[in-house]
Image (cartoon, rainbow, N blue to C red):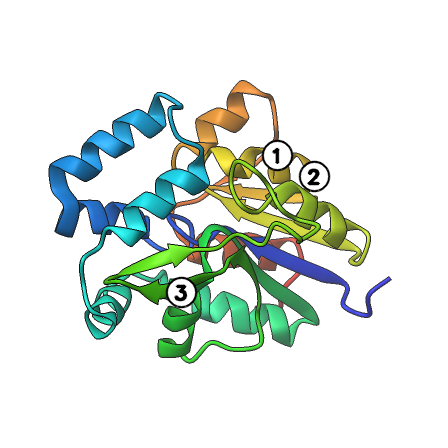
Amino acid sequence: MNNKRFIFVSDFDGTLTAKDFYQMIIDDYIGEVGQELYKAWRRKEYKDKDFLAQIYRSIGRDEDEILEDILKIEWDEHASEVIQKIKDSGGEFAILSAGTSYYIDRLLEAKKISDLKVYSNPGYYQDRGIHLKPDESSPYYSDVYGIDKAKVVKAFKEQYEKVYFAGDSAPDIEPAKLADLVFAKGTLQEMLREQDIPFIPINHFGEVEDELIRRGVLRA
């Protein structure tokens, strides 16, 4: 058993942020082409990792310009306080994303947030876009998402006394089934209701903090 008594695991896009980065790219740069890709993905004509790969490599911006876009991501500022309180209370915080660590790492650095576990698809800049390179040798690899969130959470269950989880969409259903306590935003709420999976609905991480204080996980 890990010497940390608990870990809080959170999705990134739409959970720690107000909007998915891929949606920002579609809205700002690839417009109708991106919307058609989105519709095809929703019709299941693309796997998630392939849809995201096509969106991100189509940005058409220099790397410095892409960094500017990353810094425009609307981060939930409540989360910064929650992360620090989790550390102060003897826990750890992990980000678990089917996007790419390329933009996650850069935003965290800009927010001066460090010492987090980040599990996501590797990515790199090339030819005016971000190229995803899922690690097929990883024990957490998924042919659909690039990373299997449930496998990561299952591994955490063997290392920590408690695993708390927050998410907002379909890839978060399976890890939510495994967690000891689930916080849900967005479309994940109805998805969990349909499967009778208990959760706490949230709009921002201030509500996560309140609930964890109420349960005695965090100190007020």
Alpha-carbon neighbours of circle 1 within 10 Å: few (<14), some, or many (≥20)? some
The span from disc 2 to disc 3 (Cα, nearest Å) is 31 Å
Total marks placed: 3
Instruction: Tell me, yes or no, whether the two marked residues, 2 and 1, touch with CB atoms within 8 Å.
Output: yes
Tell me where residue 86 appears, x and y as whole percent.
Answer: 60, 68
Kind of residue indicated by mark 1: Glu
Q: Which residue is mark 1?
A: 174
In-front residue for pair 128/38: 128
In-front residue for pair 43/16: 43
Mark toward the viewer: 3 or 1: 3
Q: Residue furthest front?
A: 127
Does residue 196 show up? yes
Occupied quadrant, residue 91: bottom right
Q: Which residue is mark 2?
A: 178
Q: In the picture shown, does residue 207 fall above or below 68?
A: above
Q: In the picture shown, does residue 190 fall above or below 4?
A: above
In-front residue for pair 145/16: 145
Q: Which mark is residue 124?
A: 3
Q: Which residue does the image show at 63% across and 76% down from the upper left?
A: 88
Tell me where residue 35 appears, x and y as whole percent.
Answer: 20, 34
